Image: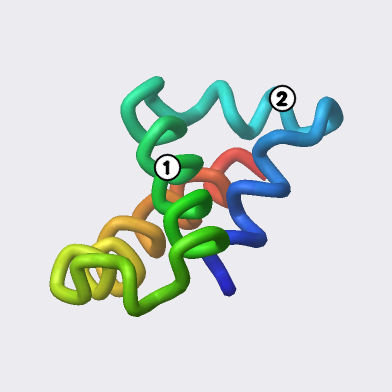
Amino acid sequence: MALIRLAGLLERPESERLAERLTADELDAIRTTRNIAARAGYDGMNHEVFWRAITIRVPQIIDRLLDGM
């Protein structure tokens, strides 16, 4: 759910400045993972990769987004 919400936040026009703090690869990865989770469900994902994304990468991204606020 956190990844789905993060993807939605970054797609809003008013969040453009936040999205600019991320690389194109990070934005693509967030969108792609959100799409897989929303359409295929958690069972359709690689659980190990998903867990690393949620526990390591997403917190790092959120820290970077909050750093400039």
Q: Does residue 69 appear to the left or right of 67 in the view shown? A: right
Q: Does residue 6 appear to the left or right of 31 in the view shown? A: right
Specify the amino acid type for callout 2: Glu
Q: Does residue 53 appear to the left or right of 69 in the view shown? A: left
Q: Point out the image quarter for the N terminus.
A: bottom right
With respect to residue 7, does 48 lie above or below?
Answer: below
Q: Percent x, y for residue 11?
A: 70, 34
Residue drawn at x 50%, y 41% as measured from the top left: 31
Residue denoted by label 1: 32
Residue drawn at x 83%, y 26% as measured from the top left: 13
Q: Percent x, y for residue 21?
A: 50, 28
Specify the amino acid type for callout 1: Thr
With respect to residue 69, does 21 lie above or below?
Answer: above
Contact between marks 1 and 2 (CB within 8 A): the answer is no
Residue drawn at x 60%, y 48% as measured from the top left: 7
With respect to residue 4, does 7 lie above or below?
Answer: above
Residue drawn at x 28%, y 66% as measured from the top left: 45
Residue denoted by label 2: 16
Q: Does residue 55 appear to the left or right of 11 in the view shown? A: left
> Circle 1 — which element?
helix
Q: Percent x, y for residue 20?
A: 56, 22
What is the total number of numbered labels drawn onto the structure image? 2
Query: In terms of sequence position, does the residue under pointer 1 or pointer 2 come before the other?
Result: 2
> Circle 2 — which element?
helix
Numbered circle sitting on residue 67: none
Which image quadrant for residue 22? Answer: top left
